[in-house]
């Protein structure tokens, strides 16, 4: 795995069928880097992540009242209290090319990270106007990591035409564009996201059906891990054990996720036919129609993102927490009893707006979960969050008005000192 005193940020534990990228370890660095490895190696790696939320926000409960660094978090942003000193809550930002279309959601999602004019089309001949900023970053940051960029999501890519706007739904299924005409595909299955990260995944080859007794990736690399432990100091052994424990935790939680068979057992033949007609997968039915709690699924995806940053397997990640006009049922949240999209068209009904706020706060809670995890990982004189820029936002301000003005945008982390929250 690692010979002599050679060191690479892409050092891995390996076994037959699995490989685990490792965090930086002082014990493995050449003597010339030992004094200050983070400085001598050009500094800790810089990372970028973007979390996208569909359907906008409750406009009156988002923005803090004060300007500057001494501000009180708004009701929706209150879950960010523990990392408030590492936040920038940006206001009065607009995507000018979103004003040039009357379409409500889809094109305002497609250009979220391109900020370019989106071509109006009803088929797969899409054009987002340019390459998205995450892919531009990946061209520079990603060349030094295992995966130049990762794209995660919750909903599968949708096809067809929106009946109310006459625009392809493909625009609402991605924020990441390799070229103006080539969207990046999303991984929406946490198990597949984990396996791609830690197992010897072959692109284009379908995995075998899940085996509940499949060997743990840690068991596969255990011999390599034991050899490594003999060569590293106590501080690095603690770091290694902490990292591998995090990997094990995610793997165990994946094993505890409800299986597709559990969902299928609840569905009648007539329901299966209706789902097929509507092009909805069975697992999507469970999450949408029944209001199944997707918090754990979402957090497993976020934890995989954390592992990718921690080990430097990737430095650029996007995560769509829902497609445009997402109709996910958030009835798993107390006080909510309907579709996200329908609630966002609140018509200024106080009851609907109260539910809208609850859904918004749930999304921010997931963002806070990610930030706190990254901020708990020490790196040099700071944390992984300090060396990252983590963007959260939506392509709309208020789902009712479909306004792309004064977009809800938060940036966390200082990107290794390049951003300041003062």
Image (cartoon, rainbow, N blue to C red):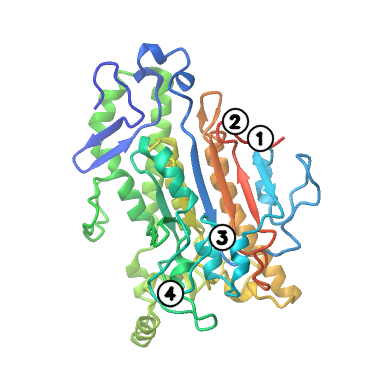
Tell which residue pokes out farthest to the right in this image. Answer: 66
Could you say which is closer to the camera, residue 302 or residue 316?
316
Tell me the quarter of the picture where residue 364 sits.
bottom right
Judged from the image, the secondary structure of the residue bearing numbered disc 4 is: helix
CB contact under 8 Å: marks 1 and 4: no
Could you say which is closer to the camera, residue 287 or residue 216?
287
Left or right placement of residue 286 versus residue 85 in this view: left
Could you say which is closer to the camera, residue 246 or residue 33?
33
Left or right placement of residue 404 versus residue 161 in this view: right
**Above or below 271: residue 1:** above
What is the C-alpha distance between the residues marked 2 and 4? 44 Å
> Which mark is first along the chain, 3 or 4?
3
> Which mark is first along the chain, 1 or 3?
3
Crowd tier of the residue under label 1, counting other residues whose Cα lies within 10 Å: few below 14, some 14–19, many 20 or above:
some
What is the C-alpha distance between the residues marked 3 and 1? 24 Å
Left or right placement of residue 379 versus residue 145 in this view: right
Q: Residue at x 36, y 18 (%)?
A: 29
Residue 246 in sight in this render: no
Crowd tier of the residue under label 3, counting other residues whose Cα lies within 10 Å: few below 14, some 14–19, many 20 or above:
many
CB contact under 8 Å: marks 2 and 1: yes
Tell which residue pokes out farthest to the bottom in this image. Answer: 270
- Residue at mark 4: 285
Judged from the image, the secondary structure of the residue bearing numbered disc 1 is: loop
- Residue at mark 1: 420
Give the quarter of the figure containing the N terminus.
Answer: top left
């Amino acid at each position: 795995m690692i010979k002599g005193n050679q060191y690479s940020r892409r050092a891995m534990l390996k076994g037959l069928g699995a490989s685990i990228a490792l965090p930086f370890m002082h014990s493995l660095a050449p003597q010339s880097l030992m004094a200050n490895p983070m400085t001598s190696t050009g500094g800790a790696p810089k990372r970028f992540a973007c979390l996208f939320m569909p359907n906008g926000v409750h406009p009156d409960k988002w923005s803090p009242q004060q300007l500057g660094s001494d501000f009180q978090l708004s009701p929706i942003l209150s879950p960010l209290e523990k990392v408030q000193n590492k936040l920038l809550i940006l206001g009065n930002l607009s995507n000018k090319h979103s004003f040039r279309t009357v379409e409500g959601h889809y094109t305002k999602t497609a250009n979220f990270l391109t900020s370019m004019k989106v071509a109006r089309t009803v088929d797969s001949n899409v054009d987002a106007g340019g390459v998205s900023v995450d892919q531009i970053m990946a061209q520079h940051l990603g060349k030094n990591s295992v995966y130049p960029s990762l794209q995660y999501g919750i909903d599968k890519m949708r096809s067809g035409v929106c009946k109310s706007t006459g625009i392809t739904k493909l625009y609402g299924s991605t924020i990441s564009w390799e070229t103006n005409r080539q969207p990046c595909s999303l991984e929406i299955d946490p198990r597949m996201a984990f396996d791609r990260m830690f197992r010897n995944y072959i692109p284009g080859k379908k995995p075998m059906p899940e085996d509940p007794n499949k060997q743990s990736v840690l068991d596969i690399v255990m011999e390599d891990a034991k050899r490594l432990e003999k060569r590293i100091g106590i501080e690095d052994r603690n770091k290694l054990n902490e990292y591998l424990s995090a990997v094990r935790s995610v793997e165990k939680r994946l094993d505890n996720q409800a299986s597709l068979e559990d969902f299928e057992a609840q569905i009648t033949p007539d329901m299966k036919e209706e789902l097929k007609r509507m092009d909805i997968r069975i697992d999507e039915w469970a999450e949408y129609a029944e209001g199944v709690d997707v918090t754990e699924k979402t957090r497993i995806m976020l934890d995989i993102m954390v592992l990718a940053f921690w080990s430097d397997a990737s430095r650029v990640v996007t995560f769509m927490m829902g497609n445009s006009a997402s109709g996910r049922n958030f009835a798993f949240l107390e006080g909510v009893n309907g579709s996200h999209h329908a609630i966002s068209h609140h018509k200024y009904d106080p009851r609907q707006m109260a539910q809208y706020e609850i859904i918004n706060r749930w999304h921010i809670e997931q963002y806070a979960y990610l930030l706190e995890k990254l901020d708990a990982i020490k790196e040099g004189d700071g944390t992984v969050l300090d060396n990252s820029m983590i963007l959260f936002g939506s392509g709309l301000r208020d789902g009712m008005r479909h306004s792309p003005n004064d977009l809800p945008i938060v940036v966390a982390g200082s990107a290794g000192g390049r951003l300041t929250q003062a």
